[in-house]
Image (tube, rainbow, N blue to C red):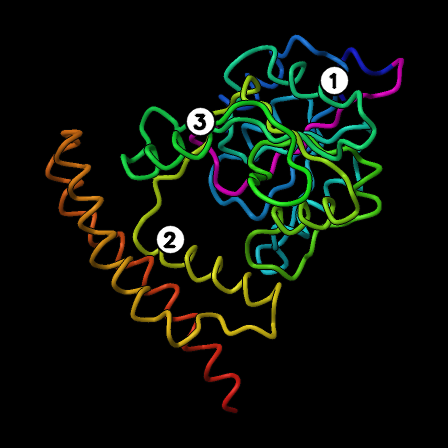
Amino acid sequence: MHSNTKTKEIDVSILIRTKDEEKYIKTVLDSVFSQSFKNFEVIVVDGGSTDKTLEITRGYPVKVLEIKPNDFTFGYSLNLGFQHTAGKYIASLSGHASPLSEDWLEIAISNFSDHNIAAVMCRTLPWPDCNPFDRRGLLKKYSIPKQVFAKGPPFIFSNSSSVIRKTVWEKIHFDETLTASEDEDWAEKARKLNYKIIFEPSAKVYHSHNWTLKQICRRAYNEELSIVQRAPEEPALKPCTLTSLFFYDLFAGSVYDMFNVLIKRDGLKWFFYAPLRRLAIAYGKFSCFINKSNSHSQ
């Protein structure tokens, strides 16, 4: 437990999910323990790290919960962590999501004066070494003013950096069967119960990925599969959308990315990488469609 929380109730539990995060975890924990708001505990849920993540983590005053890799899902790791929290509010961070300022937590939890607020979504910014494609996507997605998400669009929510009222989680647990998008699924269920979610752009974190093509493909597959899991009556991809999928992801998407690389002068490396990245995305989605179609035919 944090040294300042032993004699009083804990207001916030900071839940950090890790797997092989030795590159970032020290930066993340240093930022967490430098927060101006002090009444918190830190719980780390590790999904089977094989690097120095746990060694680094245990050098801080945190509680560590370990999950076997075969048992891991995003929803399960979150529910397990939430079950071991003592705070009224649960701040969720990815193991490579680092608060940018000492008032990140203070700013985020200041939004809970209204009891209908279920959660606060923080602003995500790309790490300095982020690839140009994800950098542009994140800057565009999160360049919106502070607002309340009630029913209907627009809508942004991610457990990479969010704060959730624990009493709402006690009513709505994360779906442990989903391969991705467990955060959006949870938030949509909360909004259906007339809860609100706030986007707080002043609470900023670094969070981005520099995935390999294999990881990009797997992520695209899992995201498409999560859509199927949330709406099993719908096909993963309707046959009429396959042409548009490959046209957009392979042709139009590649041309768009390559054009941006040129005008932004990102370098030839990214120019030639752009179509490979789009191919990985398209192949991941298409593989999900094929698997879904085969399962229906059996």
The amino acid beneath tag 1 is His
Q: Nearer the viewer, residue 37 or 7?
A: 37
Locate residue 133 relative to residue 46 in the image: left or right: left
The residue sitting at the bottom extreme is 298
| Location of residue 109 in the rendering, given as x and y in whole percent from the top left corner | 71, 20
Q: Decide whether residue 17 is among the magenta residues.
A: yes
Q: Secondary structure at mark 3?
A: loop
Measured Cα–Cα span from mark 2 to mark 1: 35 Å
Measured Cα–Cα span from mark 3 to mark 2: 26 Å
| Location of residue 196 in the rendering, given as x and y in whole percent from the top left corner | 72, 36
Q: Nearer the viewer, residue 287 or 136?
A: 136
Residue drawn at x 71%, y 21% as measured from the top left: 111
Specify the segment rendered in magenta.
7-24
Dot 3 or dot 2, earlier in sequence: 3
Rendered-image quadrant of the N terminus: top right
Q: Secondary structure at mark 2?
A: helix
Q: Nearer the viewer, residue 11 or 184?
A: 184
- Neighbourhood count class around disc 3 (C-alpha, 10 Å): few under 14, some 14–19, many 20 upward: few
Tell me the number on the disc at residue 2: 1
The residue sitting at the front extreme is 152
Residue drawn at x 63%, y 12% as measured from the top left: 35
In the picture of the structure, the residue carrying the numbered disc 3 is 143
Residue drawn at x 32%, y 33% as measured from the top left: 136
In the picture of the structure, the residue carrying the numbered disc 2 is 215
Locate residue 31 relative to residue 171 in the image: left or right: left
